[in-house]
Amino acid sequence: MNFRLNKPLNILYLASFLFAIHLALTSFVNSSFLGQHINSSTVGILFTIGSVLAILALLQMPRILNRFGEYKTILTLVSLGGLSLFGLATISSPNLLIAIFVIYFAVNSLIFFSLDILIENYSDDETTGGTRGLFLTSMNIAWVLSPMIAGFIIVKMGFTGIYIVSLLAMVPLFFLLFNKFKKYKDPEYVHAPFKKTFLRLIENKNILKVFHANFTLQFFYSWMVIYTPIYLNQVIGFPWDKIGIIFTIMLIPFVILEIPLGRIADKWLGEKELMTAGFIIMTLATGTIAFIGAPKLLLWALILFTTRIGASMVEIMTETYFFKQVDGEDVDLISFFRNASPLAYIIAPLLATVFLLIFPFKSLFIALAIIVALGLISSLTLKDTQ
């Protein structure tokens, strides 16, 4: 592919990479960082509060975009994210840190949504799989690189260093968007009442099914992101530098699989078969985690790598399927689709908090495997686009 920085989609791939660098560096340490200030078993509640805030804001995004435009909105969100990172790096008051984290967590969902809008407006339906594959891969390269870097930074500089380095990644993101999208022309964004949008979702059975599949995937991510670092560090006994290596290996499938899978979905197979295979792999591999107790780096890397083979298949297929059904003006439906992540971060931590009061930590992964298996209900009954 001829990569030229004056092509809007290529600019957005680079912007997505920069956004993901900062997001990935913080994501796998946020729960442990917060655990220094509150009980680890209740950390999930903060993710729930941040997710509620994100959902409320996402529901207002069509109105915000119509009033201020995409350009001003995304620059404001990136600035707010940067200020939040500065606060997390420099403030020591637990109560203030908690408030800043909730804002930071919500803002990330809004930035991701705004990048979605830009990419959808520059995309064609015929190449949705390839475009979404490149978008996700540009982000996933950052996710693969970040855990090992994060482990090194924590050992040398502690959690403060993570948030400082993440802030540094947000600076070029701001200026890239500032310089390249000054002349962006907004479409007329659809701002339908919540009830009308919900009815559209219910009436279109296939969009409803792909929403459920996406929610199941986001539920998987939320439990994994919040509780796997704590489990590996506090239960299994891995130091942070080793956890960084494990997570780097774990995330490789997202980089090597999503572009070819997206193109396969565009040209040959439909999304249904690959999505179903992904859910089966995720279910089996996630359930296996509960039965591994030894701190063997390669074993843990292999089993977590396998979970992400399945997750990468589900991720690119849900993205491809959904964005073949909508256009850039359908902000209400895109907002609903992106609400799957904060919604998962509301429900999953609350369930996990109650679950951990009754069952041992390792049982969390058996429960997660059962929940992931429910995604098959939607994938098996989905109407293929091929």
Image: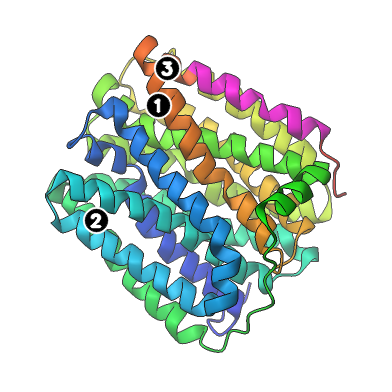
Locate residue 46, reporting x and y percent.
34, 39
Q: Residue 300: which numbered mark, if any?
A: 1
In the image, what residue type sits under mark 1?
A: Trp
Query: How far, Cα to Cα, is label 1 from label 2?
Result: 27 Å
Q: Residue 163: which numbered mark, if any?
A: 2
The quarter of the image holding the N terminus is: bottom right
Q: Tell me: 223 left or right of 91.
A: right
In the image, what residue type sits under mark 2?
A: Tyr
- Residue at 70% x, 32% y is 277
Assess whether mark 3 and mark 1 are in contact (beta carbons under 8 angstroms): no
Query: Mark 3, residues whose alpha carbon is within 10 Å: few (<14), some, or many (≥20)?
Result: some
| First-in-chain label (1 vs 2) | 2
The stretch of residues the image draws in magenta is 366-381
Query: How far, Cα to Cα, is label 1 from label 3?
Result: 23 Å
Residue 297 to residue 154: above or below: above
In the image, what residue type sits under mark 3?
A: Phe
Which image quarter: residue 171? bottom left
Q: Main secondary structure of the magenta part?
A: helix
Assess whether mark 2 and mark 3 are in contact (beta carbons under 8 angstroms): no
> Which residue bears the numbered disc 3?
355
Is 375 colored magenta in this rendering? yes
Q: Mark 1 vs mark 3: give the one in front.
A: 3
